Image (cartoon, helix red, strand yellow):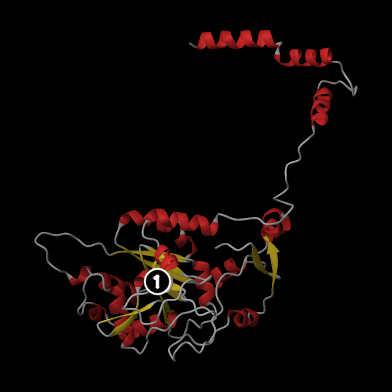
Amino acid sequence: MVHFYYRICLFFLGMTLGIIIKKSNMFDEKAVPIHSYDVWFKNQGLLRRAVSWDNLRYVKHMNKSVIESNFLFKKVTILCIILMKNDKYFKSIKETWANGCNTIQFIDIRKKKVIPIKRNNKNSSWVKLCLYLQDVGNYDWLLITSDLTFVIMENLRYFLAPFNPEQKHYLGHPVEFWKTKYNSVHSGIVISKGTVSAFKNAIKDSDCLFSSYWNREDYYLGKTLASLNITPVDNKDVNGYSVFYPGNLNNLIFHGDSGDKSDVFPIKCCSRYTISFQALDGDKMYTYYYLLYTLQLFTEGHFGNTPQVHENDDEVWKTFLKQRNVTRDYVTSAEYYKLWVDLIDDPISFAAKMKRETVDDT
């Protein structure tokens, strides 16, 4: 959710969203290694200070400040690859969370209904993704999602910033299928530039066509990366909460830490720095986007939260007299009545006029 205060760089004033990744004894040897965002941030030679929403919105010189999340947008480049099974979600994705991507690539993986039905591997979701990865451009990170995934891009960049994208990283929510551990596309798959480079060097176009079937692009990607000794890791925040969620928020919140038998690591809900979850439909994407990026609660401030000044009754009639060029502090009731008659007609004439207008209209 949107915080009330943002941490602002001293010469880059701005917001801090995300998590500090820290080693914990509860993780096995495949847990994410020690990476501290604060250490990384300090190594950039930057400082920050807190600025309230009231100042950020209404003080003019603050308009020149750079929010920290905007700094990360340029520093940590992400290509979002969205696998589209249903066209109706295209608009909602593009107008909501995908605004945080540096570049968006939609890949059509809809099933083609042909009679007689004949399976064509070239049209499978894995082949399309595999071939696209062969020619993908130069980005620090690739995010691969389904068309029902909602991603908080600011939290993702905060999570990724301490990592070296030149190294091999494969992040997300690990599951297991057919004795292969891989990251589920429903919670988003994140691979680094180093992983993409290793993939390109090892996989040929013809390899993409081998044993590929519908709706298993995440499995085949994981299986291919495993052959390159690139495997999933446990992704938790500093408090041990999961950050990539394969399910929807309703299940996460009301069913707590429940997961699926296929989960490699137990799901623990819910992190303040959640990165991804399932939206289930396009309308919910707009709802989540509004709650995260538009709705704001002000708890203090005198620039934008100044209450309206209400005049007392004496001030109201004195103001009225001054507008009529009456400088005296006191007038009789008859004089006051005549001023109003001159302004809007006497009550009898006013009522008659309204009656005539009503009759004419009918």
Residue with the most extreme left position: 116
Residue 232 horizontal/vertical position (percent): 38, 83
Callout 1 crowding tier (Cα within 10 Å): few <14, some 14–19, many ≥20 = many
Left/right placement of residue 297 relative to residue 203 reads right
* Residue 236 visible to the viewer: yes
Q: As rendered, which of 298 and 142 lies closer to the eye?
A: 298
Give the residue at x 68% y 58%: 56
Give the residue at x 80% y 24%: 320
Residue 135 horizontal/vertical position (percent): 35, 74
Number of disc labels: 1
Q: Quadrant of residue 254?
A: bottom left
Residue 307 horizontal/vertical position (percent): 72, 45
Give the residue at x 46% y 54%: 287
Left/right placement of residue 21 relative to residue 350 reads left
Q: As rendered, which of 162 and 204 lies closer to the eye?
A: 162
Residue with the most extreme front position: 255
* Residue 138 visible to the viewer: no
Left/right placement of residue 13 relative to residue 234 reads right
Q: Measured along the vertical axis of the image, is residue 217 above or below residue 108?
A: below
In the rendered image, which residue does mark 1 sit on?
Answer: 188
Residue 175 horizontal/vertical position (percent): 34, 79
Q: Measured along the vertical axis of the image, is residue 44 above or below residue 327?
A: below
Q: Quadrant of residue 21?
A: bottom right
Give the residue at x 44% y 69%: 276
Q: Please state which amino acid type lies under the numbered disc 1.
A: Gly
Q: Helix, strand or loop at disc 1? A: loop
Q: Quadrant of the N terminus?
A: bottom right
